[in-house]
Image (cartoon, rainbow, N blue to C red):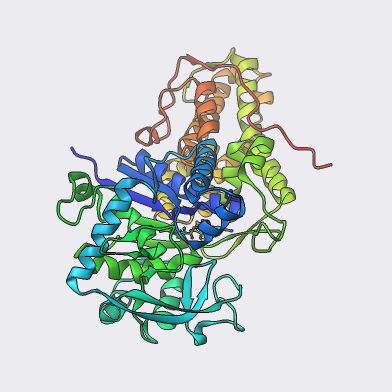
Amino acid sequence: MEKEKYYISTAIAYTSGKPHIGNIYEIILADSIARYKRLKGYDVYFQTGTDEHGEKIEIKAKNVGKTPKDFVDGIAGEIKDIWNLMNISYDKFVRTTDPIHEKEVQKIFQKMYDKGDIYLGEYSGLYCTDCEAFWTESQLVEGKCPDCGRDVTLKKEEAYFFKLSKYQKRLEELFETNDTFLKPESRRNEMLNNFIKPGLQDLCVSRTSFTWGIPVPFNDKHVVYVWLDALTNYITNIGYDTENPSDEFKKYWPADLHLIGKDIVRFHSIYWPAFLWSLDLELPHQIFGHPWLLSNNDKIGKSKGNAIYADELANKYGVDAVRYYVLHEIPYANDGNITYELLEERYNSDLANILGNLVNRTLAMSKKYFNSEVTNPKVNEKIDDSLIEYANNLLSNVDKKMDEYKISEALDEIFELLRRSNKYIDETCPWTLAKDENQSDRLKTVLYNLLESIRISAILLRPFIPETTEKIFKMLNTKNTGFDTLSFGNLETNITLNEAEILFNRIDNK
Ligand code: ME8
């Protein structure tokens, strides 16, 4: 049977500088969802990449004495290295300077123009260079850019416009009738009430004030507005073509999920649908605008000096500790926080004490009492029932959380099995059973139940901390690591466990 497809994308990162831990949160979140869906049996296509054009990047390159292309090549390489370091299982890393993308953006612009959705006009407005966005007076917050808080300048230029106003009604309808298109719910209300209902103005989609962009095909004084260039990455890289879209495109489009941060929801939920309608294409199934990660409860910024970088954290604590922290600490709709102290606390309490300790104690007892041999004589007692029942229901409980992108809660569900297993050790007292030869079969069963709980937890933890779970499977010497083996009792018997290794060394906070 052919697998059902699942296309997930992240925002493409600006190549204006090295990404900080906040930017990396998104890619780790996307990676966990992609890995989860693969384990569920989907044919997953996971796309990420870099957004490389625009005035901001042109200026940055100039400041360091490089051509824009040299500059973005360097940063894109750095971003890719960090994605790889963090074990991101993307299928394609795209760049907006890829010739295939640039060529198609020109065709898209032409198609919209031929259709009458793009026309030539003059723009005069308040412009934020950093966000590459024009604002109206009423949108400013205390006279500054409402997105980044920086100064805006008055700018006038001949420009092409996209008839966003034409799609006003259709957008209203979309937001009013489809309650799954944009999540969380709070973002949907914000877009509808603050942006769509007050009335949409046509959107300026070309610039003449700088040159680092894709030239408008029929007027090379203009470059294509960076958001039209950037948003179309989701289709150009899977083979969209205005005349002859590829089979890959037909298979994967519409995307199932665009995962993006809360600051760019407006571009994705208002401009992007209008662009797609203009091209007569279907809309993505869902957009999820995730909250942000703050550093010491403050917005992360290089100029603020509070930027924390994923590679530094990974070198210090390990890749999986960083993945676990950001996934666990960011709730569904509110911003999360990171500091070195918080990360160390979470590392010790969850990864070292709950997970690491359970694995170590269980393997050490198996070695001490039975030479690491796994058997299950099935001498069960009442106390086993709730542990087994919890483990057997875990997939369905985790599934529910994953469907809503409540990753932190999904992790809590899994860690609850580990917690219960630790408690099960205290309740069954294997060291007492070991003193009584008549209890040997009971002791074997207790250890089997523990090993099986570890195996089940590890399978469900695979999408989140993949390196660690590989180590656990190796220690357990098991081949049963897929979601289809999740029911209790699938750990092979008559196998011998491998040597235990420490998964997470406790950090001494002092
Ligand atoms: O916006 N916590 O690129 P970008 C969580 N090129 N997520 C954060 C964050 C934080 N502290 N800071 C940023 C762009 N992000 C455009 C996207 S898509 C067609 C074009 C998220 O490099 C941010 O919300 O500024 C965005 O989703 C992603 O990182 C890339 O941000």
Would residue 480 be found to the left or right of residue 371 on screen? left
Would residue 230 be found to the left or right of residue 163 on screen? right
Indicate whether 33 appears above or below 168: above
Image quarter of the N terminus: top left
Q: Is residue 193 visible?
A: yes
Which residue is nearer to you in this view: 181 or 348?
181
Q: Please tell me in which quadrant of the rendered image residue 362 appears.
A: top right
| Whole-percent x, y for residue 254 in the image | 26, 56
| Whole-percent x, y for residue 252 in the image | 25, 49
Indicate whether 33 appears above or below 471: below
Which residue is nearer to you in this view: 366 or 285?
285
Would residue 23 be found to the left or right of residue 259 on screen? right
| Whole-percent x, y for residue 74 in the image | 53, 42
What residue is at 56 percent from the left and 65 percent from the top? Answer: 334
Q: Is residue 184 visible?
A: no
Image quarter of the C terminus: top right
Would residue 232 be found to the left or right of residue 436 on screen? left
What residue is at 61 percent from the left and 23 percent from the top? Answer: 363
What residue is at 49 percent from the left and 41 percent from the top? Answer: 80
Residue located farthest toward the top when viewing the structure as drawn: 371
Q: Please tell me in which quadrant of the rendered image residue 16 appears.
A: bottom right
